Image (cartoon, grey):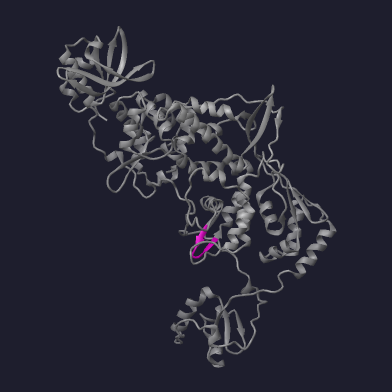
Amino acid sequence: MNISEVIHKLSPEQAKMYEKNPIWKNATQRGLSWQEAIVDHKAIQEASLLMTSHALEVLKRVLLIFGPVPVEEDRLLAKLRVHSLLSGAEIRLGVRQLEEAGLLLAVRKTWGEKVIFIVQQCYQIWFRILFPCTLHNVSSSNLMAISDESGQFVGNKESFGRKLLYALATLMKWDRNFTSKGVLSKKTISKLVEQIGINEVPFRAFGLNWAHSETYPLIVALVLEAGQTQGFLYRKENTLLLDMVNLNCWFQTTEELRESQLLDWLCGFLFKYAGRDASVAIAIMSLQRGQWFKVTDIENWCNRLVETSVSKDQQMQSSVGWTERWLSLFHELGWIELAQCVENGESYRVFCWKVFQSHNSEELIVQPNGEIIIGPGSRFDIRFELELICERMNGEEAVLYQLTPQSVATAIEHSRTRDSIASFLKAASGDEQLPSSVLSMLEEWTRRAGRFTFAEVTLLRCDSVEMAETATLLQEVAPHLIQRLGEFDYIIEASKRDHIRRYLQKAGYPPRKGIQRADERIAAHAIDVTDQHVVIQSDKIITAGKREMGTFLYDSFTLSHYELDNITRREEVILLPGIEQLPAAWWQQLRSYHTSTRKELIQQAVMLQTAVQLKLAGNLHTFVPEQMEKRGDEWAVTGKLISNDVGEFSRLTPDMWEEMRLLIPGSHTM
């Protein structure tokens, strides 16, 4: 879940309880609520210094082993016992402390199974703080551009924000009605693929699932999902509509902010598919913008992360594979540049995060032949309008557009006129006078375009001239009669049909049931479609009420339909049941015990899932016992022997240590 979903489900009492946790002391003193602190970098940095060692180690292991993926509590506890140096009791205590601070949250499934997760936005922040990635950049003086098999340079591509803009403009120009199968028309899908121009291979590596995969290409599903989640698209009945209010707000933001928001959204979605290998993306994303770095340096850094759940060979394969996946994805979406660097006879691949403009420029250049050149940082509202009135000729940083008869005809379809197009181009070019040749082209093309229209209308048919006259006298019906056709018929809006039916019923003129087919009566008069009220239609923006939403990409693990586990109503759980019945000396000091007492103490440690401290050959070691072995009167214990922060599976017999004591984590209760 992301923070907004959590806040929606969280009770005020639980949020207040989180705020009272000691790790948020500095944040609350600055006036931050828990909801604000949990996504605030400084607050999280401070919290990391105030956490217990058990809680901090559990959080590190959760981030490394599971990443942002929700996990069942039993599986989490079992994995942490295998892949950490903590005892079971220390793990349970650490998990509990993280829950009490709101760093780990939980939901319960209908059958009672508890699933633990970390808030989506917190994952990246915590990972960067606990596992900072600092690499040395390389000089840009020896870079060589990368080209494909055809010799085309491919190191730098258009940004995802622009691609999304192209998709939205395409939807404005083409049919947005859903078919009986609930999908857009093949023509619209084909146009989206053509205009988006994104290679879907880097996305397929993530194993994504999406709706109507037999009809929608993955890239189409991606941009539709992006448009919907960003608030630009919504479904109303059987049509996909554009929210021009939200879209205009987006147009006014800077390129830097737009791309940053899209990067955060996409990574938040993909991280759950990537699991622990989302860490590779975070490492890449943490590097300074505008600087070049070696691809191998990222791979080596990822390999140095302590990931004990896989072998070293698997770690290297995983890091190399996922580094390639993330770099390919970020490059395809125009967020990073790729190049080859040659230095001292050595050639290696490098990458660089693109620096997007933090301000918008407004000017474009209009050429006498109808070509229009728009610079890299131009406002999106200008780009969007150009998409509606021109044809895009390339996909470079500086984009070339061309006015054509067909593009102008399409613009006329969307209520543009010669004057409105000319006024827009003049204003967008810094109030420069347009070339006379461009004005002449617009005059000629707009004079011919859109002069004929096909319209689908609904007729209200009267059975006589008398009833046709009566209809004009009915106060609630007359305003809906758009145009009279001949002696008997009126054009009405299809959406008003049921209203008119009720008005006629109320006035004492109940109409016939059903809708008359065209072949039941042939109209004797042609329909006059010159009335703009009949032929002009536009999307109406919904400003209130709940919109119908459609999901295009499937989440890998959704928790939104579960309720949060409320720890304010949770009963106290005994961390070490029966500890009060054991001699306090067992954990208060190191002592030498008889073999039988050593056995009993180890048995208690196994049962309580706690560690023991042993003096072996005069040196103190922590030992996490896991299983007792008995052979007649002899016994041994297997477990994890920890030395210099390294755990090694060991088998110990009671004669191997001189002194021992139980290690009790924290308090006795959770």
Q: Residue at x 30, y 19 (%)?
A: 650
The image shows a total of numbered marks equal to 0
Q: Is residue 590 visible?
A: no
Q: Is residue 33 left or right of residue 455?
A: left
Q: Quadrant of the N terminus?
A: top left
> In the image, what residue occupies the spot 70% across and 40% down?
153
Residue 62 falls in image quadrant: top left
The vertical placement of 239 against 345, above or below, is: below
Q: Is residue 57 left or right of residue 627?
A: right
Residue drawn at (69%, 64%) of the image: 410
The reply to whether residue 510 is visible in this rendering is yes
Instruction: Assess whether residue 18 is covered by the magenta stretch.
Output: no
Where residue 189 appears, as percent x and y from the top left, is 58, 59
Q: Whole-percent x and y of residue 265?
A: 52, 44
Q: Is residue 668 above or below residue 497?
A: above
Residue at position x 15%, y 22% from top?
Answer: 581
Outermost residue toward the top?
A: 618
State the image coordinates of residue 397 (x, y, percent, origin top left). 70, 44
Which quadrant of the view contains residue 55? top left
Q: Main secondary structure of the magenta part?
A: strand
Q: Is residue 598 left or right of residue 170?
A: left
Residue 392, position as x, y percentages in the image: 71, 53
The residue lying toward the viewer, choosing from 537 and 128, is: 128
Query: Split into 4 quadrants, where in the image is the C terminus?
Result: top left
Q: Which residues are magenta?
A: 234-240
Identity of the residue furthest to the right in this view: 436
